[in-house]
Amino acid sequence: MPRTRGVSVRMRLALSYAGVVVVTGLLLLAVVWLFLLRYVPRRPDYNGSFVPGRGDLVDAFLPRAGLALAVLLVLGLVGGWLLAGQVLAPLERLAEAARRVEAGSLSHRVDLPGRSDEFRDLADAFDAMLETVEAQVETQQRFAANASHELRTPLAVTRALLDVAREDPSRDAALLVERLSAVNTRAVDLTEALLLLSRADQLPAVREVVDLSLLAEEAVETLLPLAEPRGVALDASGEAASTSGSPALLLQVVTNLVHNGIVHNVDGPGDGAGPGDGRAGEPAVVHVRTRVDGDHVELVVENTGEEVPADLVPTLTQPFQRGAARLHDGDGGTGLGLAIVDAVVRAHGGRLDLAPRPGGGLVVRVRLARASVAPSP
């Protein structure tokens, strides 16, 4: 709500400086009166010669003292105004930066020069906040654009299928329903992944102690029906690795990594996989390992697969980036798996490292702080 404009801070500081100067002058006059003039006789008489008394000194002193006080008042106001302007100059730059941010410019910085003090610390904190906000806004804008494009695709396919069915009522209705169901499932999966990614950095206030090795076993058991028809073997091993955080989000991390290792793998000779396209002598496999490294725990997911170019690896944690040119029909995912993993790991104060696997495939390493208390069975 609008506020009535009051006296500026600069004017109040100038008046304060001038008031201090005048009060100091009055105190000096009081000291002169108390410790000097009060001891002068009123009418001294030294053998008929004239000697100025207390009244004479007061009459001579007070006009000049009043003039000095007036000069001090003017100097205090002018000097206080100039000094306050210099002191408040950093706040003016901060206010100008805030106005530019309000107008939509997040690239402007205060960049206050000089040595460190309270104002410069405030300006540096303001600049750091702007950098964070600008990065988050850019990420959200880029993510919103990508999400809009990805969500538009299944809707367009649905509309095309319905248009074809309307123009040709004799087409197989069961096939149409099956295709619409597949498109709808992908749209639902994508929406759920988007919601999970948006909430990935919102951890619960109370964290629980979680054993990554148990999560790895649960993820492998859950995804085994997906891996078996492809002939992809799942191998979970390692020692107990306890960390603290959200069990649901950390389970999502392990599940996403194992799922990613399955769908971006080579087809082995499993049931339903057909002749397969795996390399001779290298079975399709996903290794899931956990270990303790000092004050940290590590989860390593390594899968065989196609060659991953080194320049592509840094982009894999960006939304809607897929590491392989070929994706299996129906299981290609939404392109948000590693983006969700990266967001969850960063929210837990950890680090996610990706590296191409020699011979093809990917090695993903999750590093988290070790919990001091072992989890309950």
Image: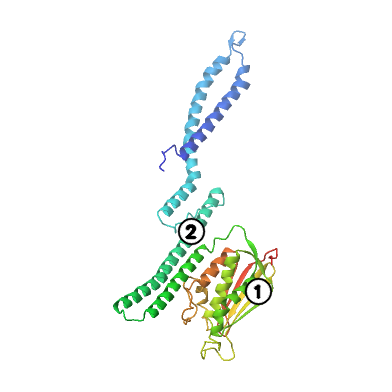
Instruction: State left or right for residue 139 relative to residue 42.
Output: left
> Which residue matches tag 2?
133
Circles 1, 2 touching at the beta carbon (< 8 Å)? no
> Which residue matches tag 1?
290
Q: Position of residue 88 (x, y in %)?
A: 49, 44
Residue type highlighted by circle 1: Thr
State whether residue 90 appears in this view. yes
How many numbered badges does the structure rendering display?
Answer: 2
Q: Residue furthest left?
A: 167
- Figure quadrant of the C terminus: bottom right
Estimate how packed mark 1 is, as few (under 14), some (14 to 19) or many (20 or more) residues with alpha carbons within 10 Å: many
Q: Position of residue 319 (x, y in %)?
A: 48, 70
Instruction: State left or right for residue 202 relative to residue 175.
Output: right
User: Which residue does the image show at 49% across and 63% down from the upper left?
Assistant: 198
Instruction: Work out whether 189 lies above or below 56.
Output: below
Which type of secondary structure does the marked residue at label 2 adopt?
helix
